[in-house]
Image: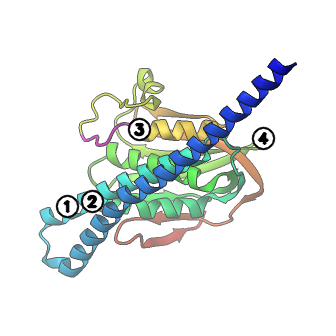
Amino acid sequence: MDHLEDEIARLHGRIAQLESEKADVEAFAAVAAHELLAPLVLADAYATTVADRLDHAVHADERRDLDALRAAASRTRLLVETLLHDARSHGRPLRLRAIDLEGLVRESLTLVEPEMEARGAEVQVEPLPVALGEEALVGAVFTNLLLNALRYGPREHATIVIRAAVRDGVCRVCVESEGPAIPAADRERIFARYQRGRGERRARGAGLGLTICRHIVERHGGEIGVTAEASGVNSFYFTLPASPRGAAAQGVSRFHGARMRPKAPVPG
């Protein structure tokens, strides 16, 4: 009996030690994230200020360079924030709440605005339902899928369509974009860490975006994948639990760059 009590005491001590170490790691991660994010925010702000002040005096090549700087800062900032939030939430149940997916998409569009401006892209957002999930994490899925569509779509005047449908209590969201059809053999592999599809000449980063998306969606009990048409349309989809609140009744919204000014909605 004494041996059992000693073992229980030892286990309690070990649990307390692990909890203390976890708190130390989280504190360090928060400080490290702050130190990483500060110069990224500053670089983005300076690039935006320079572009605004010079306006039409900026040569087209210089404008592209400034857009590329803003895009790089936004991508890295997103990666740091997503990894930090996911690390903090790991090991605890997700805080599922009703999410206005359309509002979340609008927030993601502001993050990818530099990429949209650089490519003259348009994003069409069809009426989206209300889903259940942890907002910050689901937002990271949208942002990563949008970045993926922008990077590997047409260099200019790309069109991305976001739509969703609810069936049997499951919300299925699709992000469709033009581009070379992803071969069937690559459609699972590209979600693995550090992997990209073949022939992606313009890829930047560590190849973690789709891996992060899969991890987040699976934590929500959903699934993620991609389908492709021979005509050159790739559709990345993911599922979330649907909310009883349903969908917003409005038409298609179209967004482009230039500080994310939306075009007039098109009745649906």
- The residue indicated by pointer 4 is 168
Queried whether the magenta region covers residue 77, the answer comes back as: no
| First-in-chain label (4 vs 1) | 1
Labels 4, 1: front one: 1
Callout 4: 10 Å neighbours few (<14), some, many (20+)?
few
The mark nearer the N terminus, 1 or 2, is 1
Lower sequence index among marks 2 and 3: 2
Which of the two residues, 104 or 94, is positioned nearer the viewer here? 94
Residue at image position (37%, 29%) is: 195
Q: CA distance from mark 2 to mark 4?
A: 40 Å
Q: Secondary structure at mark 4?
A: loop
Query: Pointer 3: what residue?
Result: 208
In the image, what residue type sits under mark 3?
Leu
Residues rendered magenta in the picture: 202-208
Left or right, 76 with respect to 133, comes to left
Residue 118's disc is 2
